[in-house]
Structure formats: C-alpha cells, structure tokens
Amino acid sequence: MKYDLVIKNGNVVIEHSVEKLDIGILDGKIAEISKEIDGNSAEIIDASHQYVMPGMIDAHVHICEPGRTEWEGFVTGTQALAAGGTTSFVDMPLNALPATTTKSSLHLKLKSAENKAYVDYALYGGLVPDNLEDLEELSNEGVVAFKCFMATCGSAEIGDFKNVDDFTLYQGMKKLSELGHILSIHAENAELTDKLAIDKKKQGKTTARDYVESRPIFTEVDAVKRALLFGKETGCKLHFVHISSGEAVEEILIAREQGQEVTIESCPHYFMLDTEDFENMGPVAKCAPPLRSKTEQDKLWEALKEGKIDILTSDHSPCPPVMKQSDTNNMFDVWGGISGCQNNVDLMFDEAVRNRGVSVSEFSKMIATKPAEIFNLRNKGSIKVSYDADIIILDPNKSYTVKPEDLYYRHQQSPYVGRTINCRVTQTFVRGQLVFDLEKGIVGQPIGKFISTKSSFVKA
C-alpha cells in the first residue's frame, strides 16, 4: 500500500511498551503500525535511534488573543508549541479580552484563531460570578471543559476574568454536573493569600521569598479541600490545575479513593525550579501558586514517580517584558506567569525519564494519552491505527542550551534560558503534516483546527 508518509526504524511508544516499528500515515491518520512497511510512499522519515511518540496535548495554555495579542497570539504561541513537541492544546478562558465566558466571546476567540494556529486547539469556557446562565450555551458551542479561579484574579478592565465566590462555585458545579462537564480549578484561598500579601507589603517585605510566604501550601490545601467538598455535594467532575505540593496531591487522592471523579495536573516549573531559583532569577520565575522549597519539590517528584499526578501541562502564561519589571524590585507588583511551553517535552523527558527513572511509556501517558482521555479529545493522544497522526520524534541524546533567539514566543523570555537540556524534539507532525523540523524550523502555513466536543472529529 502506498502511504503519504512512513516513519521507519523508530523506537515507537505505544500503550504499554516501546518497540522498533514503522508507522504508515494516510490522509492524516495512522493507517498501519508494523515491524516493517514495504512499498513506495510519498515520503519516508528515518527515525533510527530516536523515540517516536504521540505529540503532547498541553491542556493549560494562555493564548492572549483577542485583546492582548501583544502578550501572546495564536501565531507565535502555536509556533512555540509545535517547536516543543505539542500537537494539540486547550486554551484557557482568561488573559484574552474579553475572557471566554459567553457565547459571543467564544466566537471572538474562534474568529481570532482562524488560519493562525500551527497545531490543533480546543477551548475552555470560564466560570465567573456573572455567567451561570451562559454555561449551557458555552457547552453547546463545543468547549471541552470549564475553568474557575478560587484565588483572586483579573483586572478592572471590562471583560476580564474574575474569581468565583463560594456561591458561584457551588452553583456552577451543580450546573456543570448536569451538563456532564469537568470543572478545572485554580485552588488557592483568596482571602488568606490577599491579606497575607497586604501584611507583607505593609512591613516593606516584597522580595521573592516574601511573595512565596504570602501563598503558603496550606492555602492551596484549604482551597482543594473546599472544592472537593462542593464537588462531592454536587457530583461535579473536577480537575485541579498546576498543583504545587505533595500535601494537596494526597488530599485529592483521598477523595478519588472515596469515589469522586477528580484528576491532577502539575507543571514543569514546579519540578525544575524552586524558591531559591526564584530568588536568583527574579520576576521571570514568578507564578501562582509559587515555586516551593527544594524539600517540597522532592515530595512532588515522589508523587509523580508513583503515578499520582495524572498529566503534565505548561501553564504557559506570557506577558510583555515591562510587566516583569519593577523599579523597586517588588515581587508583588510584577506579573505572575511563566513562559515555558516550548520546552515542556524535552525538559521533563530529560529530568523525569533520563535522570529519575520514569518509564517512557508512563511519560507519554502524562503528556498525551491521559490529557486526551480527561478532556475527551477523541482519536488523539496515542499511536494507534485510525488515530490522528499527531506524532513527535525525540532524540534522547541531543543536548542543547536554551537561547532567547531560539524561542518562538512573542517575547523571548523564559526561566529556562541558559539551561542545558540533554534531549530534543527534532520533528513535529500534526495529522501527518510536518509543522516543525529542527533544521528547517517552522514548516509551512498554519494548519491547526478547532477540536469541538460537538463532534467526534476535528472540525475544519
């Protein structure tokens, strides 16, 4: 049989193992997986001595278009994702203006994305204090999940995202339970973190460590426990984003063992950077929840190695450089968000697989298979016959140092600049089409499509 593309001789990551296999791709789908594929094909890729894996599904990305495209737009953001080995992502409902909290704002987001994305994309809808009546419409329009903040967020600008109060959280969970949707939660106690920050600033304590101390682990755990209680009462499926502490992981697992439908994500920066790094790097490493101590980071690593963390995401949250600056070096004043989606796969493969013994199969599940399952992205996240040919090739022995000029972000800032990583994504294919090549860079025109829950396929 003649295929559009055959990837040969690679170490292919399939469900429970890694095997030397060939993959035949036809019309954007995986058509054959076997020991050897014969016959003429339009193109043959030799992946000898490299891993052939399902592309990452990054379920936590902030593309700030429309309204704040100068922070990060679909073109630059998805180029960075493609270069980092991501083939699909779920866009968060905040940081764009207006936030994606109504049918009309969702349509604005979709219009903004047309012919600009290099990888496939799904969308979140937001849960905010004034949109309980909009949730069903957003669901009908094809969002894959909903997101809320228990921590204070947003600005005074019209249309910006707002955190929920307890009433909105409870009522929102009731509605989303009826709709069968997942609610993803940023879990930090808003009242405590806000007032701890005020106390610090009154005392003139505004360093990186002061910021971290204003958002202690117990404020994350408290919010997690409150959300779990509401989830238990309402029957709502929950997903906790960017969990930063082992204690929060254990609380969630207790609820899961008691029958709640709940999943956990964390992000590379919580594994690769700690409070001391934040003190040394400054604003580029500020995020919320904040980076934790080395001791707490070790607990999170143990949770990951034991399979307690379901998925890895970037929480790519970019901004213009001026927002990361403070004349007084006040860490409470600068933007809290990390640009990191271009280095997700290789950074964590290097540390988790190469250095800490996580199996390649388990790593692949965390970045691709489980996100597809949690967010119902059908025919994605695995190398299987009939699945979308969303594939990356990774050289486990190609070292490189992260340089600003190699970053595709609108603003070339990242806490990983200067870090040497000992493996690298060399090619990225979205539905069988090459979108990134290490030698050529970004290839071709944007081909990304909207993944809607209204259908079981990628919509044109």
Image: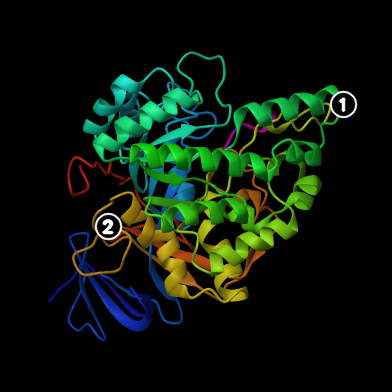
Q: Is residue 209 above or below residue 160?
A: below
For the residue pair 375 and 307, the one nearer the viewer reads as 307
Q: Is residue 42 above or below residue 17?
A: above
| Residue type for callout 1 | Gly
Q: List the residue tagged with mark 2.
A: 431
Q: Is residue 272 left or right of residue 352?
A: right
Query: Would you call the spot at circle 1 few (<14 residues within 10 Å), some (14-19), or many (20 or more)?
Result: few
Amino acid type for the residue under numbered disc 2: Arg
Residue 85 in percent (x, y) is at 45, 59
Pick whichever of labels 1 and 2 is earlier in the sequence.
1
Q: Which residue is mark 1?
A: 204
Residue 451 lies left or right of residue 92; in this view the side is left
Q: Residue 393, position in %: x, y? A: 42, 69
Q: Is residue 19 magenta?
A: no
401 shown above or below 340: below
- Residue at 58% across, 27% down: 152
* Residue at image location 66% in from the left, 43% down from the top: 218
Give the alpha-carbon distance from disc 1 to disc 2, as whole Å. Answer: 54 Å
